[in-house]
Each structure stands twice: as structure tokens, then as C-alpha cells.
Image (cartoon, grey):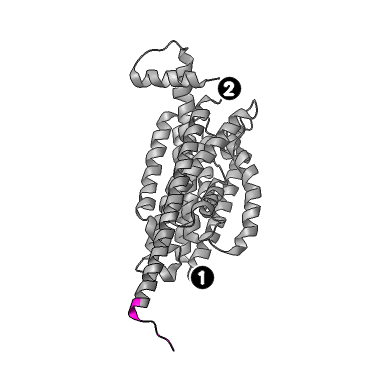
Amino acid sequence: MFYPGPLVILGTTLQRRKKLANHTHAKQDSTHSHIGASLALLLCLVVVSIMVGKFDVTLRDLITVLWARLSGASHSLPPVIDTVIFQIRIPRVAAALVVGAALSAAGATYQSLFRNPLASPDILGVSAGAGLGAVLGIALALPTFAIQMMAFVFGMATVFTVYFISQAVRGHDPMLVLVLAGVVMGALAGAGVSLLKYLADPYDELPAITFWLLGSLNAVTGDEMWVTLIIVFLGLIPLVLLRWRMNIMSLGDEEARALGIHTGRMRLLFIGAATLITAAAVSISGVIGWVGLMIPHITRLLVGPDFRRLLPMSMLIGAAYLLLIDDLARAFAEVEIPLGILTALLGAPFFLWLLARSTRGWQ
């Protein structure tokens, strides 16, 4: 039998390392091109979104007003244009960007953590819990800020209840118990929402409850945006700093523990961070489904499952997607279409395609 000499082995090893390095560089170049294209698309959508609406704003008007605001100079345009751009359009555009990026980041986290492309921010009941809190606040006639805080608190409480249930139940797969507990808590929260809708005033409270549950960004203010942005930023910090550990967690618990990762603590940290940004987004936008399911999977098809590339790309594409959906909601009809309806019309066929494709396994 022929045994290769040391020089042959060394040469083969160097060739393999060179191929691996070339493949890695090619992946990085491809990711950079995707990020550049996404940023360019996002910038174009931001400009278009500020101009779209019932009150016409031309590109020249937008440039004039922005230049006047930045330079301190005056302009001859009507004051209503300043009001529309800075008090209505820009906060709404910023809300679409933050909510789309937050839901997509949470969806990418859940899908990587559970190794399941069908996972989404709704899997642990966070959206249902936040919806129950908001509906309760509307039924109690609380101010807008209090309604948003109740949505945030109930969403967080639902997820932590689900997690503690999964830890208390022994003798079963903890991941399976976690998902099933999320389904149960989501069903209970949905029952609570139905009860409050049944008891609500049909002329005042019920329309507000229904509109909030369908999702909308038309009532977002600048102050609410800053609070939400801070909370989302805090939730993204552990996801960004520990993104390489997510790649290890996606290998499975046994492999992760063999590599020195404390899977229980790490899973709790990732779930808590993803839930924090989801609850913050839902508290200002209402329940907007399917974003956290569709966007991370589309992004994974573009850049692969590496969480270091998946997270930023999911956020960019998610922000652009929800901004486009919001533009369609404002432009399609005289009456604004709730965002949840449009995302469901696009998301349901995508889910069926994804369900058929998921038999190929995790990618």
C-alpha cells in the first residue's frame, strides 16, 4: 500500500486551506454586494415613502425642506409641508424601518436557535401576549403610551411564562415543550382577546381594538419612536456580540455543550433578547404577522445560515420589506389598508411553499 510522504500531505493540506479561504472570501464578497444592494434599495424606498401619501410631496419639495432644516435657511414652501414631512412621514418611515428590522432579527434568531425555518416571533406567544395587553389597555381607556407599555409587559410576561413551563416539565424534549407551551399560551391570550372584544363597546372600543390587532403605523409619534429604538437597540446588543455562539447553538445541544457552551443560559439569553425587540415592535405597530417568518428564510437563501451574515441582512431586507408594505397600504385605496392584511396575503402562499420545501431539512 502506498503511503503519501510528509510533503504530499502538507501540499494537500495547503491546497484545501487555500480552497477554503477562497470560498470564504467569495462568500464575504457576495455578502458585501448583497448588503450594498440592500442599502441602496432601502435608501430609495425611504425617499419614495416620504413622498407617498394623500398629501403630495415632490422630490424637489423634500430636498428644499431638508436643506432648509439642515442649513437653518428659510424656504418659500407652505408650512404644511414641513408638518407633513417631519411630524407625520418621517416618524412613520422610521417606525416601519425599526419594526421591520426588529421582527426580522427576532425571526432569524428563533429560526437559527430552533433550527427550524418555520419558526417565527409568534412561536412563543409574544405577539398574542402583547395583543392581549394592548386590548386590555384599550378596553380600560388608557392613554396611548400606557397601552403600548401594557403590550410590552404582557408580551415579555408571556414568553417568560412559557420558558419557565418548559423548565418545570421534566422527562420530555425541552425544545418541544417550549414550542408547545408557546402554542398553549398563545391560545389562552387569544381567548382573552376574544373575550375583551365581546365585552367592548361596539361603537368606540371595538373598532380601535380591531384596527390595532390588524397592525398599523399611522399613529406613531417621534417620542414613541425614540423609546422603541432604544429598547430594540438594547435587545440587539447580545445578538450582535454573541452571533458566533448562535452558529454553535444551531449545531444542536450536544455539540454545543461539547464545545463549552452552556446551552440553557445561552438559549434563555437569545430568547429574551429576541422577545424584547419583538415586544417593543409590537407595542407601537400592533400585530403584524409573517415578517419574522418570511424575511429570515429569504435572507438565508441569499447569504446562507451563518448568523454573522444572516442577522444584518435580515434586518436590512425586513426594514425595506415593511416599508414597501406600508407604502402599498397607503397608496392602494382611499382608506388605509391594515398592514397585517397585506403581510398575510403575501405570507400565506409563502408559508405553503416553505412547508413543502422544509422536507429537505435545515439549511
Query: Is 356 a magenta residue?
Result: no
Q: Which residue is mark 2?
A: 54
The crowd level at tag 2 (other Cα within 10 Å; few <14, some 14-19, many 20+) is few
Query: Is 6 a magenta residue?
Result: yes
225 left or right, relative to 119: left
Residue 276: x and y, percent? Answer: 42, 47
Q: Secondary structure at mark 1?
A: loop
Q: Which quadrant: the N terminus?
A: bottom left
Say the numbered circle drawn on residue 172: 1
Q: Which residue is rendered at x = 46% and y = 46% of the image? A: 33
Please report whichever mark, 1 or 2, sits nearer to the chain's N-terminal start: 2
Indicate the amino acid at tag 1: His
Residue 309: x and y, percent? Answer: 43, 52
Q: In this view of the protein, which residue sits in the foreground, 152 or 333? A: 333
Q: Which residue is rendered at x = 54% and y = 40% of the image? A: 321
Say the numbered circle drawn on residue 313: none
Q: Which residue is rendered at x = 42% and y = 70% of the image? A: 255
Q: In this view of the protein, which residue sits in the foreground, 153 or 238? A: 238
Residue 107: x and y, percent? Answer: 50, 51
Indicate the amino acid at tag 2: Lys
**Residue range highlighted in magenta:** 1-7
